[in-house]
Image (spheres, helix red, strand yellow):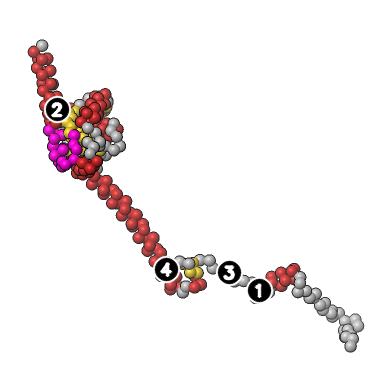
Amino acid sequence: MRIRNNVPPGSTARVATAKPVARAGSAEAASAASATSPASVAPPTDHASFLGLSQTELSPNVRAALQALLEEVGRLRQELDLTRRRISHLERVADEDAMLPIANRRAFVRELTRIISFSERYGSPGSVLYFDLNGMKQINDRFGHPAGDAALRHFAQILVEHVRDSDVVGRLGGDEFGVILAQADIAQAQEKAAQLIGVISREPLIWEGHQIQLSCSVGMHEFHGQQSADDALSKADASMYEAKREHYAGKNGDNEDAAEE
């Protein structure tokens, strides 16, 4: 049967033109259809996750609880880091002299005990030097106590800069200092003591335009183990006082000779 055009002649009505039907094999048609069809648009993917679980798999309450837990873990990590730094600071303060960047007496005795044990175990000698600065009262009286403090710092710096990294420098009290020489016999200790005294004599303290010459007395003791740290220090201290007596006896003798002249 033939379909006729039923539009009356002279009518302004238009006949709708049929749109071309896309063929199944046309890629362009498929693309156009997917672009115009709302049902074909894929929903956005949520990539956020907690512990490997996507947010779509977690209820809002669970997500909030996990977020709070992660924030608490972060806070605890910060507190742990701060605590570790505080402990490190307190350990350094406990072992360091209050005024000088060297070991205090407690830390020095502990290290001496350790090195004496090492000496006993391996059969190697060790030595301890005991220094006492001469004339500190005169420095304090003439230039003031800040100058005396500067003299102590200057002396400690000389010791630290002219011993090995394996050696230990400490302040034993007031103007007394100690140096532990690991694996050094008495001959090596004497050589090191003479070297340090030479450096001290060549490097005076410069204080507010004044050149302050420092001098010291030193005693020493060699240990081989089977001895306490206190005993080793006591023997080095006695050796130092003997040297100090000789130092002042020599100075008094020089003064008497000068007076006789």
The dot on residue 153 is: none
Q: Position of residue 30 (x, y in %)?
A: 72, 71
Residue occupying the point 41% across, 70% down: 65
Find the residue positioned furthest to the top: 261
User: In the rendered view, would you say 163 is above or below 24?
Assistant: above
User: In the rendered view, would you say 107 is above or below 181?
Assistant: below
Magenta span = 222-238
The answer to which image quadrant residue 81 occupies is bottom left
Question: Looking at the figure, which quarter contains the C terminus?
Answer: top left
The dot on residue 66 is: 4
User: In the rendered view, would you say 58 is above or below 155?
Assistant: below
10 Å neighbourhood of mark 4: few (<14), some, or many (≥20)?
A: some
In the picture of the structure, the residue carrying the numbered disc 1 is 40
The dot on residue 243 is: 2
Find the residue positioned furthest to the front: 123
Label 4 – label 2 distance at C-alpha: 72 Å
Is label 4 in contact with label 1 (beta carbons under 8 Å)?
no
Instruction: Please tell me whether mark 1 or mark 2 is closer to you in this view.
Output: 2
Residue occupying the point 86% across, 79% down: 12
The answer to which image quadrant residue 253 occupies is top left
Please, what is the three-letter code of the amino acid marked with disc 3? Pro
In the picture of the structure, the residue carrying the numbered disc 3 is 44
Please, what is the three-letter code of the amino acid marked with disc 4? Leu
10 Å neighbourhood of mark 1: few (<14), some, or many (≥20)?
A: few
